[in-house]
Image: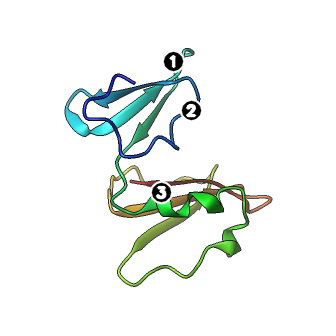
């Protein structure tokens, strides 16, 4: 890991990727694989780390959204806006099986 400061969690980073800080925002991290693909991590303000055990489960397995929380539910191939909301939890799921594929903040 080359990030300083390091991210609070690394569940989001592909195995064997290199984690660095974003050049203009030290609280945004980038995991880069040898093939050059990049995955961005915006921290855990939305508490996505507490919901990782739902990845692989049906969308319906999620509990009710906590009061005051902002969640965005979208299929993994559906179009979504590219606005960044660090306190919003994004839940991505397979459109056919409805299995959760990822949970992240942003």
The mark that comes first in sequence, 1 or 2, is: 2
Above or below — where is 29 with respect to 45?
above
Q: What numbered label is drawn on residue 14?
A: 2
Of residues 12 and 69, the one nearer the viewer is 12
Q: What numbered label is drawn on residue 85?
A: none
Neighbourhood count class around disc 3 (C-alpha, 10 Å): few under 14, some 14–19, many 20 upward: some
Q: What numbered label is drawn on residue 36?
A: 1
User: Residue visible at 67% across and 68% down?
Assistant: 59
User: Residue visible at 41% across and 38% down?
Assistant: 40
Cα distance in 3D space between marks 1 and 2: 12 Å
State the SS at label 2: loop
Residue 71 appears left or right of 95 = left
User: Residue visible at 53% across and 21% down?
Assistant: 33
Above or below — where is 47 with respect to 77?
below
Residue 27 appears left or right of 69 = left
Residue 85 at what x, y percent from top left? 33, 58
Farthest residue in the right direction?
A: 97
Q: Which residue is mark 3?
A: 49
Residue 8 at what x, y percent from top left? 36, 46
Residue 30 at what x, y percent from top left? 39, 31
Farthest residue in the left direction?
A: 24
Farthest residue in the top direction?
A: 34
């Amino acid at each position: 890991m080359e990030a300083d400061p390091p991210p609070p969690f690394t569940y989001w980073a592909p195995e064997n990727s290199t984690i660095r800080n974003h050049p203009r925002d030290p609280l945004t991290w980038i995991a880069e694989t040898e093939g050059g693909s990049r995955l961005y991590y915006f921290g855990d303000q939305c508490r996505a780390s507490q919901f990782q055990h739902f990845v692989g489960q049906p969308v319906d397995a999620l509990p009710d959204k906590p009061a005051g929380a902002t969640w965005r539910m979208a299929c993994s191939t559906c179009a979504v806006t590219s606005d960044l909301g660090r306190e919003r939890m994004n839940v991505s799921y397979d459109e056919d099986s409805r299995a959760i594929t990822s949970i992240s903040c942003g």
